[in-house]
Amino acid sequence: MSNNSAHNKRRPVLSDHKRVGKTLVPLPATYGWNHVNYVDRIFPELAWIAFLLECRGVRRGIELATNLVLAAFEESTKNPKPEFTFLSAQRVLSTDDWQRIRQRLEKAGELTETRIGLESFVRCYPRENPIRNLWDSEGAGDFTTRDVELARKVTAPRLNRWSHEGTLVQSVVLYAEARTGRLSYSENVPQPNLEAIYNNFESEEGSRASGHVRTFTTSSFARYSAELGDSWAKYFWRRGLELDPPVSHLKIRPNLDPEAHVLLRFERDFERMATEVLHDLCEKLLGHVDEETHAVVSGLLARQTTLALGVMRSAETWNWDHGPLFLRAMTDCYISLAWILIEPSDRSQKYVLHGLGQEKLWMAHYEELAKASTDERTKTSAEMMIKSSNGWIDGQLFSFLVSVNLGSWTGKSTREMAEEAGCIDLYHHAYTPYSFSAHSTWNHVGKFNSVPADSPLNKYIRLPAIPNYGLDPSIPINAAKYLDKALRTVGNAFNLKTGKALPHDWTIDRMKILAESLSSEKSEQRGQTGAAPV
């Protein structure tokens, strides 16, 4: 009785969220707080500072960066003055302004050293980069391999805004604002000890100052974000793809020995074909869409390929008990993909946000498990999972701003999505019948796993059955068809062409060869055992 009473009194998970319809909204979001993506938007604006700190040392780099901001502030003819620590703000500086800034830095003996600290930055990111105005008409020259290596070294540790290196870069925003006189603290508000960030980052004082710096950076960016725009940030990350093209995670394994079993060779050859066309299409897609859309679309294509490979790698799934478990997931994946492609950017974002919310809800249940558990192993395991999952969420969007949608991520049924995406026939003729197997409904179980007995005397009573199937080629053919359909739909949506073989036709051709080989193999086995052919 007491256990039931405790269970009934347990508060629902995420009870500190406000329910709006089917969505659990965190309180900060109800106050109008918005997420500003540090990596996407803020870091590109501060990258020039990161180069100075890396090339000239932390203390000297902060000094040089601050003095450049102070010079821009005092020599600019624009009023009101923008926040010049953000690179895009420096675009308002006129040619005459820059001439006075150069003269001022030259007089202070800092122009040459500042140029040295920023030359790789300017060479790597030359387009519409206002820092180029520190040089004369000849500029800083073209980038070299060394510049790209330095850019990697500068960027890697500072993308994490909570890291020591990342916090030091952000400290310049606050320090420069104080130097220009626009920031001051009253007697009742203690000034953060910025020195503690440098000397004792892990201490309580260092943590307090670091938190203050990061909060100030975010609020400053939010205040000026409309004037700054996002053109520089977009260029910065597009340029990164050119400087250091990403290395694909897709690995193309070598062909098997011709003497390997025909099923193993079929699986490996399909894997090579599918991986090659996936790699080719996704590489071309990268230049046509924003990063989030690319992540979602290429990720769903990779998911579809993974499911198809699951079928091809196991002939045990080539039947109507196991195969539909894969095919249902593949039709579901296709419908989601086709629906997203109607409005790729907006719907990709919606897809990601829903997934983050589902992860948050899942971890909220694990947090309850960790609190209630008296078993240390269970508690430790849950806490490790929570930490890993929350890190994954926070790497994309602060978890305290993530809403949880308890309904469909699209706000529509799968049937409605299929209608909008023009694939209602797929829904009726594939998704729906495959769902019978996935959900173990009677019109699947009653056909395959509960079969009438032979005798009329027991009214042909149904008895449990585990079918012994042969190989049904329609299962791998359909898997190939749904992968093919996904690849073609993405290609058509973005007018992308691939010269690679596509899965459906490839599988049809190879299935004929496979059937002949398996039939020949079976005949040989019968001959060896002396059995008469049937």
Image (cartoon, rainbow, N blue to C red):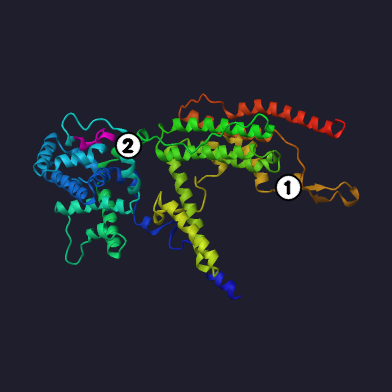
- Queried whether the magenta region covers residue 269, the answer comes back as no
In the image, residue 507 above or below residue 357: above
Q: Residue furthest top?
A: 499
> Residue 387: percent from the left, percent from the top?
45, 58
In the image, residue 194 above or below residue 445: below
- Residue depicted at 69% across the width and 31% down the height: 262
Q: Which residues are magenta?
A: 122-132
- Residue depicted at 68% across the width and 48% down the height: 440
> Residue 340: percent from the left, percent from the top?
48, 38
- Queried whether the magenta region covers residue 131, the answer comes back as yes
The quarter of the picture where the C terminus appears is top right
Residue 148's disc is 2
Q: Which residue is mark 1?
A: 445
**Mark 1: which secondary structure?**
helix
- Going from N to C along the chain, the mark reached first, 2 or 1, is 2
Q: CA distance from mark 2 to mark 1?
A: 60 Å
